[in-house]
Image (tube, rainbow, N blue to C red):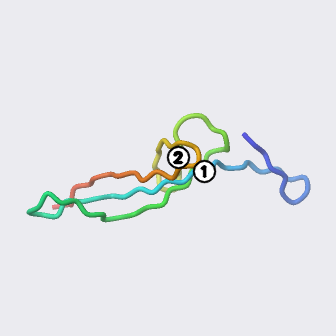
Amino acid sequence: MILVPVFGNVLVMQRCGQRAVLVITRVVEGTSTSVARHRIELVCDLASGHPGEHRDAVKDETWEAEPGRTPTLLRHEEDDP
């Protein structure tokens, strides 16, 4: 964990900040085509230098990524009947 001085003697945890884009797709009825339904930008809010997967706690998503890369993640969801 990296602590950074802010406002004199106050120390705060520096977050990871790794980014990713999650694209949620759905099928177009009667075709074999998938289209994007949502595009969500994710930001890792764990401590800088953390081990393992990145995590966006607000959007409740985890992902793996190489340092310096912003991956695009795809997730297919069925439409509600």
Going from the N terminus, do you reach mark 1 or mark 2 first?
A: 1
Residue at 87 percent of width and 60 percent of height: 7
Residue 51 lies, in percent from the top left, at 60, 34
State the image quarter where residue 81 is shown.
bottom left
State the image quarter where residue 29 is shown.
bottom left
Residue 65 lies, in percent from the top left, at 51, 43
Amino acid at dot 2? Arg
Q: Callout 2: few (<14), some (14-19), or many (20+) C-alpha neighbours within 10 Å?
A: many
In the shown orientation, is residue 19 left or right of residue 28?
Answer: right
> Circle 2 sits in a helix, a strand or a loop, which is it?
strand
User: Are discs 1 and 2 less than 8 Å apart at CB?
Assistant: yes
Q: Name the image quarter holding the N terminus.
A: top right
In the shown orientation, is residue 48 left or right of residue 42?
Answer: right
> Circle 1 sits in a helix, a strand or a loop, which is it?
loop
In the shown orientation, is residue 24 left or right of residue 8?
Answer: left
Residue 60 lies, in percent from the top left, at 47, 51
| Residue pointed to by mark 2 | 55
Distance of mark 1 from mark 2, alpha carbons? 6 Å
| Residue pointed to by mark 1 | 45
Say which of 57 and 3 sits in front.
3
Residue 3 lies, in percent from the top left, at 78, 45
Residue at 40 percent of width and 51 percent of height: 73
Amino acid at dot 1? Asp
